Structures are given as C-alpha cells and as structure tokens.
Amino acid sequence: MLSVSNAQATILNLVQPLDNQRDTEIVDLFAAESRILATPVTSPLDFPHWDNSAMDGYAVRYEDVQHSSAEQPTVLEIIEEIPAGYQPKCTIQAGQAARIFTGALMPAAADTVVMQEKTRREENRVFILAAPQSQEFVRKKAAFYQAGTQLLPAGIKLNAPEIAVLAAAQCANLNVYRRPRVAIFSTGDELVRVDEPLQPGQIVDSNQYALAALVRESGAEPLLLGIVKDEPVALSKVITDAGAIADIVLSSGGVSVGDYDYVDKILESLGAKIHIQAVDIRPGKPLTVATLPTPSSPSSPSSPSSPPSPLYFGLPGNPASVLVTFWRFVLPAIKKLSGIRAGWEPVFLKVRSHDELRSDGKRETYLWGKLHLIDGVYEFHKADGSHSSGNLINLAQTNALAVLPLGKTLISPQEEVEVLQLIKP
C-alpha cells in the first residue's frame, strides 16, 4: 500500500501532457476563456502604441516649466486641445502648451504633462503653478511591451486579464490545447439512474454526476458511459471502449476485495499495467491506477509520435471516497495532462482549526469542511455530522479538506492544521 505522497508522485510521473503539435486547436478569442495556450503569443504592436498622456492636464516642454511655482507661475499659450482618439496637428514651441486628456496622443515636441490641478486657466492661457518632474504623466511608446517579443508564454490558463491583453493585441484567434477527454462510468448492480424509481437495496448513481461536474470544472470534457453491471464481459467491453476514446478513464466502484469487484482482474486481462491498488488514505484506500494499452498498438509501448497510453483511475464506490480521491489524485493529473506548465500540484494551506479534529492515526485522514476568513485569518470549520465515506449529505458546500497525517490522532480547536484548498473561499 502506497503512502499518499508516493501515490501522487507515481500518478504525476505517469501523466504525459498533451502534445503541442498533435493536441491543439484554433479557437476564437471569445471562446478562449479557461483554455490553455499551446504556443507563445507575440504581437506586432507596441504597448503603449504611441506616447500618450496618463492624466488630464496640459502637454508642455519640460524646459519651459521646470522652475514654475505658485509664486512665480509659468504662463503658456494654449494652441490645441487633444482628446483621446484625436491626432494632434501642432508642434509645441517654446511658451506653448496643449490641453490634453487621459489616453490622448502627445503632440510633437511635448515631453511632459502637468496635471490640471496644478494649473489655472484664463481663456487661451494656462498658468503652471508647480514644477513637474521631467516626462511626468507621459506613457512612453513600448514602455509596457515591445513589438515582436513574447507577449504571453505557452502553457498558461487564459483568464480575464490574459483575454484582455490578447484583445488589445488584436489576437482574434488562438492556438490552444484541446480539452482532455475523460470517460466516466459507474459499476454496481445496485445502481440506478437519477430518473428511475428506487427498489429496496438500490441507490442512485450520484458518483457519475459528481465526477462529470468535477471534470468540467477542471477544464476537461466528460464522456459519460453510464452504469455498468457487475459482470466481467460488460466491464471488459466498457473499459476497452473507454480507452479508445479518452485520455483518462474514471470508474467508481468494483476496486475493493469483494466477490463482485472485478476491475483489477479485467485490467490485467486487457494487458493494462497496474501501478497502484491501494493508498494509505482515509477515505479512499481502494484506489486502482493503471495505464491501458494504446488503442493503436496494444502489444507495444507508445512511440514518441503516437498518443500516450490512456490513464485509468478505478475510484472507490462510496461517494465521499470518490470526491476525496478525485480532488487529491485525479485533479492534479488532469491539470498536468491539459498542458498547463505550472500550478497542477494540490494547494495546501496552514490555517487555524475551529473544531476538534480526530483520526485513528492509522492512515492519512481527510476531513471535509469549509474555510472561513475570521478577523483576517483563515479558519477551518469541519462539516457537521458523520464523516463516513458513505455520507454524501454533509459534503455539500465543502471547499477544503483538513489533513491529519499518519500517526496524528487529534488536532485541538485553535490549533494549526494543514488543509487542501479546493475552492477559494
């Protein structure tokens, strides 16, 4: 049985990121939000595109106003008014100024802007009441970015700030990684669909819905394969079919040691290589991780030019175990696969515990709950009720998991605890 840290390392070593030649597509900028950039972006535009004013005021020559003061103001003739979007017509000569507004082009020969609060205007004259700094309130051409250099690197997630940058650079279409494809199915004779009536002994397949939502949140594409009965032939077919269409396959149930837990035996019969069969974690101990044979060449390892082998995660069947093992192991794997160059590792924080947290100390234990910001300090509040792996109800609104390391049986209220951050509070 692997430790949690060794299991994570094993999984991430198995993940081969999407290929920046084979696994990309072109998308419109409006469709690029949350996508991963596959190639670096450059722009033929300088930022700013031209010298412009950072303030409403007056464009002047510094040499004319460098000795100005309220007692001895410099008086300049206003020869032009320059709003944003207007092309200046005049060149500023000695003793002259132009009324200018934020974002407007600087007129020729002007090198400084005096903010209007430090001036007094009388008809076509302006009195400069304080000496500015040389080039004050002037945004110089290419001060932010020089045309032809790298604007954004490959491997970053495109959020609103990056979208704004790309729009300003007139990048209407982008080369991004395709979304990873994740096949999902649930196993168990006791499972029924959400729209079916329950019979005694049956339960609704909530895992498939939870996993589909988590996969979408991760930026991947869920491929829903439904419920598969505990029958080896049916399981073998769905695993084979899933491996042919997906980068990652997720199943829930069938990986423990019961008489009807067939997944590991079927994986072996299909030629899959099993890397993990159990992890020293609670909840989520029965976790199977395997690489399936490549669809194009089942009997030989993939070559550099062929797609990598699909990665198989056989998750436990209990709802809490499914969510915890996804957050802890599957989510980082999807992030790394997606092509993102950094930030796919789990995020842990040291926070204060509001509640007493207990474990038997025999396995690394994860307790779900919520992070709250209390007087500027994050505090973990454990979810009320049972923390049984079968209790789905109190998982609602979870945004963090408190971690009790192996051998740790108690964390007292107000004591520091490490938490796995799931959603920023």
Image (cartoon, rainbow, N blue to C red):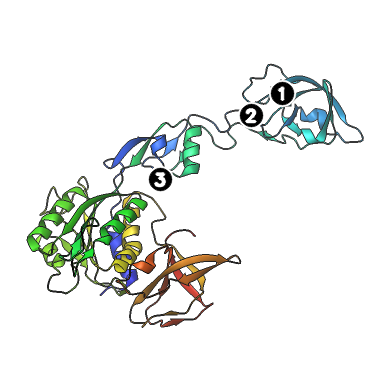
> Which residue does the numbered mark 2 point to in the structure image?
51
Q: Position of residue 317 (x, y in %)?
A: 24, 67
Q: Position of residue 62 (x, y in %)?
A: 77, 30
> Which residue does the numbered mark 3 point to in the structure image?
34
Q: Position of residue 94 (x, y in %)?
A: 80, 21
Q: Is residue 330 left or right of residue 100?
A: left
The CA distance from mark 1 to mark 2 is: 11 Å
Q: Is residue 178 above or below residue 226?
A: above
Q: Secondary structure at mark 1?
A: loop
What amino acid is labelled 3 in the image? Ser
Q: Earlier in the sequence, mark 1 or mark 2?
A: 2
What amino acid is labelled 2 in the image? Asp
352 and 344: which is toward the camera:
352
Report crowding for label 3: few under 14, some 14 to 19, many 20 or more residues within 10 A (C-alpha).
Answer: some
The CA distance from mark 3 to mark 2 is: 33 Å
Report crowding for label 1: few under 14, some 14 to 19, many 20 or more residues within 10 A (C-alpha).
Answer: some
Is there any visible trace of residue 211 in the rendered image?
yes
Q: Earlier in the sequence, mark 3 or mark 1?
A: 3
Q: Is residue 397 above or below residue 307?
A: below
Report crowding for label 2: few under 14, some 14 to 19, many 20 or more residues within 10 A (C-alpha).
Answer: many
> Which residue does the numbered mark 1 point to in the structure image?
109
